[in-house]
Image: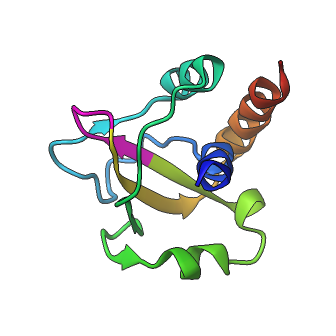
Amino acid sequence: MKKIFLLCFILFTFSCKEDTYKPEGLHFVSQEEMIEMVREGRFPSGDNTVIKNEEGKIISRDSVLSIPNLSENWTLDMYINEDFELVEMILRPATAEDKKFKERLQGEVETP
């Protein structure tokens, strides 16, 4: 499970788009919050996490993992509840900014 979270954290990055689905009542995890979590080794629990597309439709984990070039071309936005549980992730195409953040996050993961 830890490997799945690490993969997801490397894939995660964040958007400011207003025209896409955003879960209500959940906290969007920012880039800085993600860096802090990696530095502290503190990751939200996510046994029941739902993955959705930008329209809010549920996507299976198997479908996500079968996407070609997933880590290069796609990213996942994380949404947690007040109990620090990862409730939803939104899959969307990665932007140039997302790709830069992935490199920064990978550097944090690799730093002892």
Q: Is residue 91 left or right of residue 1?
A: left
| Position above or below: 39 against 45 | above
In which quadrant is the N terminus drawn? bottom right
Q: Is residue 72 left or right of residue 62?
A: right
| Position above or below: 79 against 23 | above
Residue drawn 59% across the image and 17% down it: 40
Q: Residue furthest front?
A: 1
In which quadrant is the C terminus drawn? top right
Residue 4, x across and y down, in percent: 62, 56
Residue 104, x across and y down, in percent: 76, 28
Residue 24, x across and y down, in percent: 17, 48
Q: Nearer the viewer, residue 45 or 96?
A: 45
Residue drawn 84% across the image and 29% down it: 110
Q: Nearer the viewer, residue 83 or 78?
A: 83
- Is residue 77 within the magenta segment? no
Highlighted magenta segment, given as a residue range: 78-84
Picture quadrant of residue 36: top right
Q: Residue furthest left?
A: 25
Residue drawn 52% across the image and 26% down it: 42
Q: Is residue 11 left or right of residue 55?
A: right
| Position above or below: 93 against 3 | below
| Position above or below: 105 against 7 | above
Residue drawn 47% across the image and 48% down it: 77
Task: Say how many tags the image has.
Answer: 0
